[in-house]
Image: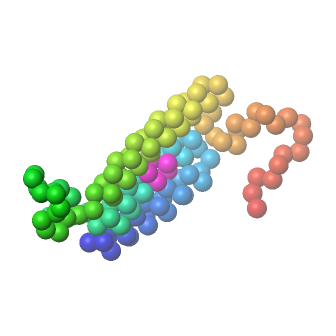
Amino acid sequence: MEAGFSVLIGIFFAASIYLMLSRQLIRILIGVALLGNAVNLLIFTAGRLTREVPPVIPEGAMVPVEVTANPLPQALILTAIVISFSFFAFLLVLAFRAYQELGTDDANDMRVAEPAGDVKPPMGY
């Protein structure tokens, strides 16, 4: 099961990096969202969360009676979900506002701070 998740995490990371290297803002946003999901799945897989062993101590017991899962990955995943959603919402609003001001979603066309007649900086390597 972990091998399948590992392959899926690798595909998510590769696709998110590919999308974030794009010039279109919408692709960059989708890449950020995909990266957040890849990180959540990575924490889920590394934490060995399973349905059969919940991280709950029975009522009245001070220590776990049997083997329990570690609740730390669940807390990390919940935190990562909140952070990735807030980051995505911020980037979405920022991209929408940039589109309203400049009329384009191409990152190269958004270079309004550079003078029009001067030599452009290197665009690639």
Residue most toward the bottom? 3
Residue 16 visible in rendering: yes
Magenta span covers which residues? 31-36
Residue 8 drawn in magenta: no
Q: Horizontally, is 93 left or right of 46 in the view? A: right
User: Image quarter for residue 109?
Assistant: top right
Please state if 119 lies on the left or on the right of 3 as rendered. right
- On whether residue 32 falls in the magenta region, the answer is yes
Image coords of residue 20 (percent x, y): 56, 52
Type of secondary structure dominating the magenta stretch:
helix
Find residue 71 and report its horizontal and vertical position in percent. Answer: 28, 57
Residue in view at x 49 percent, y 56 percent: 16
Q: Is residue 54 visible?
A: no
Q: Going 76% across and 62% down the picture, which residue do you hit?
A: 125
- The quarter of the image holding the N terminus is bottom left
Instruction: Name the residue rendered at 59%, 51% in the picture.
Output: 22
Residue 3, horizontal then vertical, whole percent? 33, 74
**Residue nearest the observer in this picture, 94 or 67:** 67
